Image (cartoon, coloured by chain):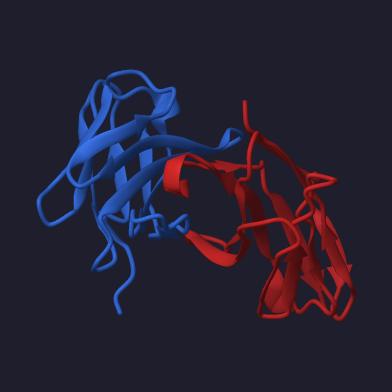
Amino acid sequence: GDSVTQMEGPVTLSEEAFLTINCTYTATGYPSLFWYVQYPGEGLQLLLKATKADDKGSNKGFEATYRKETTSFHLEKGSVQVSDSAVYFCALTRGSYNTDKLIFGTGTRLQVFP
Amino acid sequence: EAGVTQSPTHLIKTRGQQVTLRCSPISGHTSVYWYQQALGLGLQFLLWYDEGEERNRGNFPPRFSGRQFPNYSSELNVNALELEDSALYLCASSTGQGSDTQYFGPGTRLTVL
C-alpha cells in the first residue's frame, strides 16, 4: 500500500543553519505531496504542497520539490530560526479527485538553538 | 475567515465510558476528516465524511463512529473507551471538490484513565 518514510529525528541545528528533512514515498499513480508542521501543543498547519512531478512548493522560506524519479519530497530551508522548532510531517493523498485520506510519515522533530 | 474548530479542547474519561468530539469545518468546506495521533503511533486516518455520507474508514474498531450534519459539522463518537484510546484527535476539512488540501483544527486531547 501507499506509504511515506521520513528521516528520524530529532534534527538539532543552530540558528541560521541549512535544513534538510528527507521524505520518500511509495504510491501508485500520481499522488499529491504535502508538508505539515505541528508546533508544541497545537494541531497541524499546512506548510506547502506539490501536486505533480517537478512542482516546487514553497512557503515561509521552506521549499520542497516533487521528484517522481526518486519518489522524494525533501524539505529544505536555507536559514532556520528558533521559531522553526516543531515537528514536521510529510504526507501524501491519492484517490479519485485527490480528496481521500492523508497518509503521513512518522514526523521529524526539529530543534533549533540560538 | 475562521478555521476549523474543535471542542472540547481536553477531556478526561475513564475506561468503559463513551465520548463525543465535535468539529466545525471551514465555511464552504463539505468534507470532514478525523485522525488519531496517539503517542508512538503517529497520525492515523479514522473517518472521512462528505456531503453527509461516510466515504472512507480507517482500520479502527466499530466502537469508533461518527456522523456529519447538514451544516457539514461532524461528531466523532468513541464507545467503551480503552486506555489506548488516549490521544490527540484531529479534525480536518476540505472543499471536497477535487481539492486535495486538508486544513486541520487544533485537536481534542482525550485522556482515558
For the C terminus of chain A, which image quadrant? Answer: bottom right
Instruction: Describe residue A106's horizontal placement relative to residue A38 as left or right.
Output: right
Q: Answer yes or no: is residue B113 visible.
A: no
Taking the image as shown, residue A78 lies to the left or right of residue B56, namely right
Chain (red): A
Residue occupying the point 80% across, 76% down: A80
Report the residue at 20% width, 38% height from top. B53
Question: Which quarter of the picture shows residue A62?
Answer: bottom right
Q: Of all residues shown, which one is farthest toward the left?
A: B70
Q: Compare residues A10 and B62 and report the one nearer the observer.
A: B62
Q: Between B6 and A61, which is closer to the camera in this rendering?
A: A61
Letter of the chain in blue:
B
Q: Is residue B14 left or right of residue A60?
A: left
In the image, residue B83 sits, relative to residue B29, either above or below, namely above
> Of residues A38 and A6, which is closer to you in this image?
A6
Q: Is residue B57 visible?
A: yes
Question: What's the residue at 29%, 19% (across, down)?
Answer: B62
Q: Position of residue A78 (x, y in %)?
A: 85, 77
Residue A85 found in image quarter: bottom right
- Residue B112 in picture, x, y percent from top left: 36, 32
Picture layout, residue B58 above or below residue A80: above
Residue B47, position in %: x, y? 35, 36
Q: Is residue A28 above or below residue A110?
A: above
Quadrant holding the N terminus of chain A = top right
Q: Position of residue A61 (x, y in %)?
A: 73, 80
**The image quarter in which residue B68 lies:** top left
